[in-house]
Amino acid sequence: MRKSFVLKSFVLKSFVLKSFVLAGFAALSLLYSAVAFAAPLVVYSSVDEENSKVILAAFTKATGVTVDMVFLSSGPAMSRIEAEKANPQADVWFGAPNENHIIAKTRGLTQPYASKEARSLEPVFKDAEGYWHAFYMNPLGFGVLKQELEKANKPVPRAWKDLLNPDYKGMIQMPSPQSSGTSYALVQTLIALWGEDESYKFMKELNPNIQTYTQSGTAPSQNLAIGETQIAIQFTPAFLKLLDGSFPVEVVFPSEGVGFEAAAVSILQGAKNLDSAKALVDWIVSQDGQKAIVDAKTYFFPVRSDVPAGKGLPKLSDIKLIDYDREKAAQDKKRLIDRWISEVGS
């Protein structure tokens, strides 16, 4: 009887000790996870700064993942990511047209992640190996201060070739292809319409009408809003926002057709917060993430067919869209920008 009591007592003590050990390990595991998860996700964002903050705040609210965001246009972002390749300082590149992400992939700057949410995306909006995923698209267009042009007895441009009108001398702003993915999309649009040589001839003839080539892809619309320019060329969300806010801007989609960006997200090679980076990719291409983009009135077009565009956006069916070979665009980028510098921007 005594032996039985001692044995039961030993078993009970062993069970209690084991439970405490397991509980300790569980607590340490939870503590480690909490500490690891508490590290902010570092994002280099080439989405305009205002919308970057809104979208990433919605991501934090939905997932609990905190974000440190650095705004960089696509050119500076690529340069910084490449310079930091040996010691990455960011986890994610967020935004910039997808041909930039194709280049980043070929340079070994990003890593693949096949998000299950990507199954709902059309092939044009994702890399087959999971290196990048598009999360919105936007067409190019003109923002025009129609009243200002009418006061000066000048017509509203309705086509790309209309921009060559000498009446517009010094009145147009557009981004520089050297720093802006927006402007490189414009170059590709013109090449798709007319071929390379004719496009460069057009851009050279347009040069006297250009007041400023901005560094940022969204700066033309900002300057339009304060009256520093009368005609601005860029992707259209900022123009649509101004229009929705009763600002007297007319949004023109050139009659020959317009290219569009498919802004993408990539996880950087050597990302220190990999789980959080994957969570961002999953969320931004999910229905919830796409709805958040629409609900935030970014004026971006969602890339999922099961998420409708928001109020204030025109029907895509009413816009003549011009697509081009994104892989070839990525391969040709350095050569075409060097040609632009030599023949147009110098």
Image: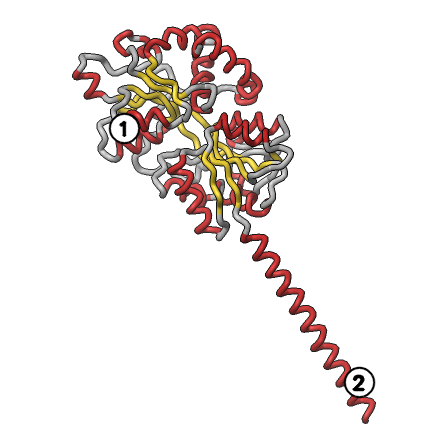
The answer to which of 203 and 84 lies nearer the viewer is: 84
Q: Which residue is mark 1?
A: 225
How far across and down, in percent of the image, does residue 20 sit?
67, 73
Name which residue lies at 54% across and 32% down.
126
Q: Which residue is mark 2?
A: 7
The answer to which of 256 and 141 lies nearer the viewer is: 141
Mark 1 neighbour class, 10 Å CA radius: few under 14, some 14 to 19, many 20 or more = many
For the C terminus, which image quadrant? top left
Name which residue lies at 42% across and 39% down.
52
How far across and down, in percent of the image, does residue 25 sit?
67, 65
What kind of element bears circle 1?
A: helix
Residue 322 makes an appearance in the image: no
Q: Quadrant of residue 187?
A: top left
What kind of element bears circle 2?
A: helix
* Residue situated furthest bottom in the rendering: 1
Q: Nearer the viewer, mark 2 or mark 1?
A: 1
How far across and down, in percent of the image, does residue 303 sit?
45, 35
| In this picture, residue 82 sits left or right of residue 200 | right
For badge 1, the amino acid type reads Ala
